[in-house]
Every structure is written in C-alpha cells, then in structure tokens.
Image (tube, helix red, strand yellow):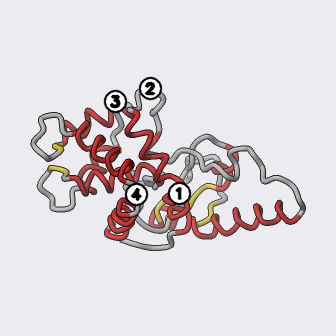
Amino acid sequence: MEEIRLAALASYNNFSEEQKKEITKIFSSMDVNGDGKVDYMEFFAYCKEIYGGDYYFHSLFHLIDQNGDDKLDFQDVMTLCYIWASGRPFCDGCKKFITGLFFTCVCCRFESSESYDLCTPCYNIRRFYFHRHTEFLDNYTFSLQLQTEINGAEETNSQPPQSQNTLEAPASSYRRGNSKGKRKSAFEFIVQALSVAASAATLATVGGN
C-alpha cells in the first residue's frame, strides 16, 4: 500500500496548479462539515453519489486511512483518487483490495465490459470455480502480451484493434454499479488527468505493499 501512496504523491507533485485545485475540490466536496477531515459517513455519501452504494467502499476507507483514526486527511483522499483513476481491482474471490500482483481473466479482459481479477492466494486455491472462464494471466504477463499484440499490429501497418479487448481495460471490480451518471466535474477532471499513467502502472506492477 505504501507504494501506491508514493505513486499518488508523485503524480500530485507533477500536476499543474489547475489539477491540484481539482484535487482540493474533491476533498472539499467530501468534507461536508469543513473540519479538514473526511469521516466515514462523508466518505460513503460521496461514493454513493459518484458510484452508487457498494460494499467495497467500507474496506477501502480503512485501507486508505493511513493513521487509523477513522478520518481521511488530504493525502488519504489523494491516494483514493489515484486508486480510482488507476482501476486497481478488488479480488473477486475474497473481496479484498489488491495492492500488488493479481491474476486477471483473459476472456473477460478481451470480451467483457468488466474484468474478473483474483489475488494470488485466491488464484492459488482456484477460487474461480463459479466463474465461466479458466484462462488467467498475472497482470505483468498480460501487459506484455498486450504490448506484443499492439507492436505486431503496428509492424503490419494495421491499426490496433479499437474494441475494448485491447487498449481500454474493462471496469474493475469496485466500479460495478456506477451507472448513475452523477459524477462531479472535479472528479471527472482529475480521473482523466491521472488515468493514462496510473492505468499503465496498474498492469505493469508486479509487487508492492
């Protein structure tokens, strides 16, 4: 988790002043009572407005609460924005947030609007017995395979496939149920600013805490 915090901080430090202001807007939108902290009820209300209610948010709140005081400070929210933008998944087996290497269903990545991802312990015990596919790759291998396909397409002077099975990764587990269309402009702005670099980091990460 510390690696993710550092990546979020590095991204923020390289933002333009306008982008930094948008992060501040997101924090202020969460901090309804203006006390400089975001408690769980404020956090959940914001998440519900943006995505719709989801049981993943409870575990996410405690994960990003670095000092464990049940309140989020500005840097915690900055980390949250980075997690949202990068699409880092929750395990579809144990439902825990995955901070390092994970195994992803190849068919779902290529054919579905949502991914199916497992942490290493869940994949080790084959916790995909209720899933319709059995072909999985770790995120690093999947990233290399994807790049090989893209390079091959370029070498043959053809355009990379435009369907979601290559360049655009499907929605991660935590994004399910987010079709309410209530995203605030500041949230959209900052996610777009983070998404390209963060998505690359998600697929290329092979470890971390």
Amino acid type indicated by mark 4: Phe
Amino acid type indicated by mark 3: Glu
Q: Label 1 vs label 3: CA separation? A: 24 Å
Query: Who's the residue at 25% across and 44% down the image?
Result: 27
- Residue 188 numbered mark, or none: none
Q: Label 4 vs label 1: CA separation? A: 17 Å
Amino acid type indicated by mark 2: Lys
- Residue 49 numbered mark, or none: 3
Is 152 left or right of 166, judged from the image as shown?
right
Frontmost of labels 4 and 1 is 4
> Which badge, 4 or 1, is on the more N-terminal residue?
4
Q: Are marks 4 and 1 in contact (CB under 8 Å)?
A: no
The residue where tag 1 is placed is 199
Determine whether the residue tagged by mark 2 lies in a helix, strand or loop.
loop
Determine whether the residue tagged by mark 4 lies in a helix, strand or loop.
loop
Q: Residues within 10 Å of mark 1 (few under 14, many from 20)?
A: some
Q: Residues within 10 Å of mark 4 (few under 14, many from 20)?
A: some
Determine whether the residue tagged by mark 1 lies in a helix, strand or loop.
helix
Q: Label 1 vs label 2: CA separation? A: 23 Å
- Residue 180 numbered mark, or none: 2
> Which badge, 2 or 3, is on the more N-terminal residue?
3
Determine whether the residue tagged by mark 3 lies in a helix, strand or loop.
helix
What number of labels is visible? Answer: 4
